Amino acid sequence: MCLQVTGPKHRNVVVLTLFCVLGVFGISFYYHYEIRWTPVYLAYSVTGNYERPKTITNITNVLHDGAWTIKSDGRLGNQMGEYATLYGLAKLNGHPAYITTGLFNWLAPIFKISLPHLQKSVIKRIKWRHYWLHDWMSEEYKSISGKYVYFGGYPCSWTFYHHIRKEILREFTFHDFIKEEANAYLEKLKGSRKNVTYIGVHVRRGDYVHIMPNSRKGVVADKGYLDKAMAYFRDKYQEPVFVVTSNGMQWCKENINNSRGDVYFAGDSNESSPVKDFSFLAHCNHTIMTIGTFGIWAGYLAGGEVIYLDNFTLPGSPFLKLFHYDAAFLPEWKGIPADLSPLLSAKPRQ
């Protein structure tokens, strides 16, 4: 059926109607994008009721009291680092902290975070002082000036927030339905074991297999590293259970020694959702990580012993201008040096 327009009055009516329809659509889209949008992978992995942090839509109080916030960048581990850094710096400097829609959408479906959420419409009305952070705490960060500060960077160092560890762990408390699912999964793995000790194993591969040797002059974890790390826990605990998560699960199944039947690949031996992977790791007793912020945060939340891949770059790596080993890994964590021989024996690229 076609709509016939026979005169100027009818044209005006049609145009007005179209504007109304588009207006309603636009408001609906804005509402869902601003308030309800969730990162794609979260939409498939987080399904449950949870209490959301307060959303700020009125700019009056913000203008009066001031506001510090931080840019949302990267994936889950980066988002957690940004949140914790903002929390720590704002508290240290005595300013109210707010999170952006990006951080809200990443973290609120997973954790019981408390920092209020600033809508984009409010953020756009504030004249911010943009402040870039490097990835470790510096003396000048203890006295940052500005009533409205918008941090940038990829901070994920314990040096920003470890002095308030209890508060950070409270912020990153999982929603009950996620916690229950993780505990039920681990209980299922227990089987008939009486003295089980869970060790979460995160193996970062994916894009890092190419990024590390080509851009960062470094390596990812190899079979030898994982053998040593797992041997440490097998020698120490009577009935260890290794829960392996990875974005390269096929490689893990081919290279991790499971001759004792104590290794389980999370997600029925396939790559499961990152949220489930993370919750499984965080609810284990101890952690074996390779590289990346995902594994760092899993170890931090688990709270037991953490073994990490140490010295995984050549001394002259450009990555070391951005990354400090001692700022990334807690002093009590145990590092196993990486095997850099593949880099040393590689032929220079033409």
Image (cartoon, rainbow, N blue to C red):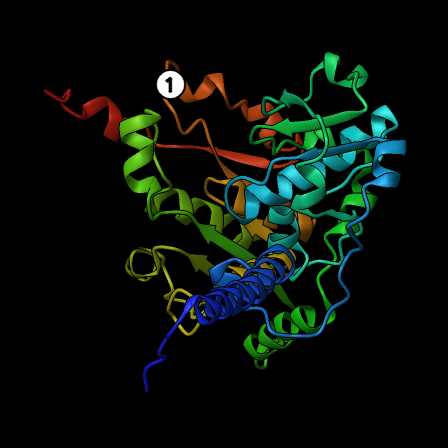
- What residue is shown at x 42% (from left), y 74% (from top)? 268
Q: Quadrant of the C terminus?
A: top left
Question: Could you say which is closer to the camera, residue 12 or residue 25?
Answer: 12
Residue 249 image point, x, y percent: 35, 60
Q: Is residue 308 above or below residue 186?
A: above
Q: Which residue is mark 1?
A: 317
Q: Residues within 10 Å of mark 1 (few under 14, many from 20)?
A: some
Which residue is farthest bottom? 1
Quarter residue 218 falls in: top left
Tell me if I can see residue 243 in this picture: no
Q: Amino acid at mark 1?
A: Ser
Residue 316 image point, x, y percent: 37, 13
In-image side of 255 versus 36 (left or right): left
- What residue is shown at x 46% (from left), y 59% (from top)? 245
Residue 7 image point, x, y percent: 40, 70
- What residue is shown at x 80% (from left), y 31% (from top)? 90
Residue 258 image point, x, y percent: 38, 64
Quarter residue 20 falls in: bottom right
In-image side of 137 versus 320 (left or right): right
- What residue is shown at x 24% (from left), y 30% (from top)? 342
Which element type, helix, strand or loop, lies under badge 1? loop
In the rendered picture of this protein, how many numbered marks are placed on residues? Answer: 1
Q: Quadrant of the N terminus?
A: bottom left
In-image side of 72 versus 210 (left or right): right
Tell me if I can see residue 16 in this picture: yes
Question: Could you say which is closer to the camera, residue 308 or residue 11?
Answer: 11
Question: Could you say which is closer to the camera, residue 187 or residue 138?
Answer: 138
